[in-house]
Image: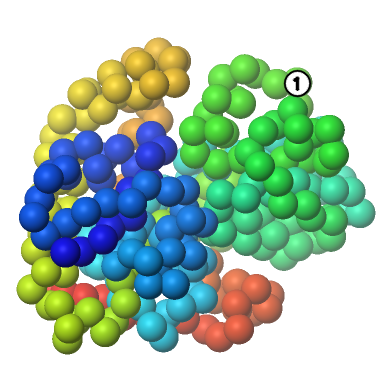
Amino acid sequence: MIRIGHNPNTNMLPMFYFLPRDHPLMTSVTAEPTGHNAMLADGQIDMAPISAFSYGEHWQDYAMLPNLSVSTKGRVGSILLFSKVPLQDLDGLTVALTNTSATSVNLTKILLHHYYGVTPRYLTMPSNLEGMFAKADAALLIADAAIQAALLHPDCYIYDLGEEWLHHTGCSMTYAVWAFPKRLISEREGEVLTVYRLLIDAKAKALCNLEDIVKTCQTMLGGTLAFWRDYFSQFNYGLDHTLISGLQKYLDLCFELKLLPSRPVFKFWPEE
C-alpha cells in the first residue's frame, strides 16, 4: 500500500479529481503542503505533491516523478503578497508569511532580498489576511486562502509572485513536485510505478474534463465560471524541460542565498 499525500486546495483538483479513491494499492492522507513536507520526511507517507523547496531540502533522499508538477509561466492567481506599501518600501517593515507553504515563503524572500533589495522582518502566521495585517505590513497567502482574500478586493497592493518571478528572471515557476524516497525504487518498484500511472491517467482525464472541475470550484469558493476557467488556464501540471529549467533556477537561488544548505541535483523516476 502506497500512502500518498492529498492536497485539498482547488489548484490541486486536476491531480485528484479523477484519481481512484478505493484502489487496493493506494491510500491518501489529507494535509496542506507543509504538512506533506513533514510527513514525507518523517516516513508517515510514501509519496506526495510536496513544496519544490522541500525537494531541495531532501534531494539526496528523494526522487521526483516525471511529468507531474504544479507550475506556471507568469501569473498564478493564488500565490499573492498583499501589502500596505509598494514592495520596494518594505525594508525594515514586517511581512507575515503563511504557515502552509515552503516554496512561496522562500520565493518571497528571494524576490524581496535579491530583486527588490529590501530586508523586512518576517513572522509566520496562520493564513488569515485580517489577522496578518493586524501584526504586519504585508502578508503572503497561498492557494484557496489567497483566492478568497483577493475576491474580497482588499484595499491594498496585491502582487502575484508568479508574475514577479517571470518579470525578474524570465523563467517559469514550479511550486510543487511529486516526490518519494529513493529507497522505494528498489523496495517497492512495482507499487510506485502503478501509482505513478494512476496519477498520470488522472491528470490526463482532468485536463480533458476541466469544466467539471471549474464547476466544483465555483461551488466550493464562489466566483464566476469565467474566473475559474481563467484560473486553471494559467497552470501547467506537467514537468517539461522548460519547467525543469525554471525549477533549477529557483533552487539555485535558494542555495546561493543560503536558504538551502546544498545545491540540489534532480533524480527522476521512472526514467523516460
Residue type at numbered disc 1: Asp
Q: Position of residue 84 (x, y in %)?
A: 82, 33
Q: Is residue 214 left or right of residue 231?
A: left
Which residue lies at the image location 72% right of the left edge and 41% below the top edge? 139
On the question of residue 174 being in view, the answer is no
> Which is more toward the observer, 22 or 204?
22
Q: Is residue 36 left or right of residue 83?
A: left
Callout 1: few (<14), some (14-19), or many (20+) C-alpha neighbours within 10 Å? few
Q: Is residue 161 left or right of residue 70?
A: right
> Which is more toward the observer, 186 or 105?
186
Which residue lies at the image location 51% right of the left edge and 76% below the top edge? 57
On the question of residue 66 being in view, the answer is yes
Residue under circle 1?
A: 155
Q: Is residue 263 above or below residue 12?
A: below
Q: Position of residue 80 (x, y in %)?
A: 60, 39
Q: Position of residue 180 (x, y in %)?
A: 30, 71
State the quadrant of the N terminus.
bottom left
Which residue lies at the image location 70% right of the left edge and 31% below the top edge? 129
Q: Is residue 179 above or below residue 233?
A: below
Quarter of image, res 168:
bottom right
Q: Is residue 69 left or right of residue 94?
A: left
Which residue lies at the image location 84% right of the left edge and 56% below the top edge? 121
Q: Secondary structure at mark 1?
A: loop
State the quadrant of the C terminus.
bottom left
